[in-house]
Image (spheres, rainbow, N blue to C red):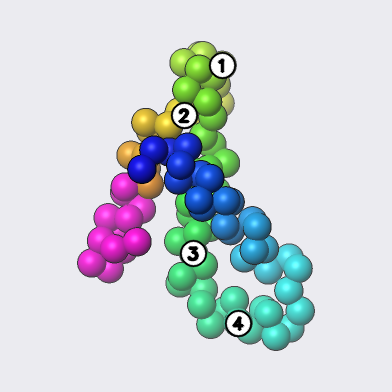
């Protein structure tokens, strides 16, 4: 699967479903706490990968690299590291 296909399917899951809890009531907060370990995976993907990924054309620019941005190849490498850290290496 290409990085573009992943992004289309994943659809910013962490932010789309407000898994940071900013829209949750007390019951929602309790549910998020119950599944905190599962939510943490999606937070990692959102904050450390998707928020820093940019187009491959922009990733070639020094100003983007200096700002910590990266293209699809690096994003896929980082996603693989996240998956490798899962129990059994399963997504």
Which residue is tagged 4? 31
Q: Secondary structure at mark 4?
A: helix
Q: Residues within 10 Å of mark 2 (few under 14, many from 20)?
A: many
Q: Quadrant of residue 2?
A: top left
Q: Is residue 7 above or below residue 14?
A: above
Residue 70 position in % (x across, y down)? 47, 29
Residue 84 is covered by the magenta coloring: yes
For marks 4 and 1, give the one nearer the viewer: 4
Q: Secondary structure at mark 3?
A: helix
**Distance of mark 1 from mark 3, alpha carbons?**
30 Å
Mark 1 or mark 2: name the one nearer the start of the chain: 1
Which residue is tagged 1? 63
**Which quadrant: the N terminus?**
top left
Name the dominant secondary structure of the magenta segment: helix
User: Residue at coordinates 54% horizontally, 19% vertically from top-left?
Assistant: 58
Residue 70, numbered label = 2
Q: Secondary structure at mark 1?
A: helix
């Amino acid at each position: 699967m290409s990085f573009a296909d992943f992004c289309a399917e994943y659809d910013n899951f962490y932010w789309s479903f407000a898994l940071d809890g900013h829209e949750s009531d007390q019951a929602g907060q309790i549910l998020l706490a119950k599944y905190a370990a599962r939510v943490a995976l999606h937070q990692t993907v959102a904050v450390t990968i998707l928020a820093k990924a940019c187009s491959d054309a922009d990733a070639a620019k020094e100003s983007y690299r200096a700002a910590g941005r990266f293209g699809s190849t690096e994003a896929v490498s980082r996603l693989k590291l996240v998956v490798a850290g899962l129990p059994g290496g399963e997504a």
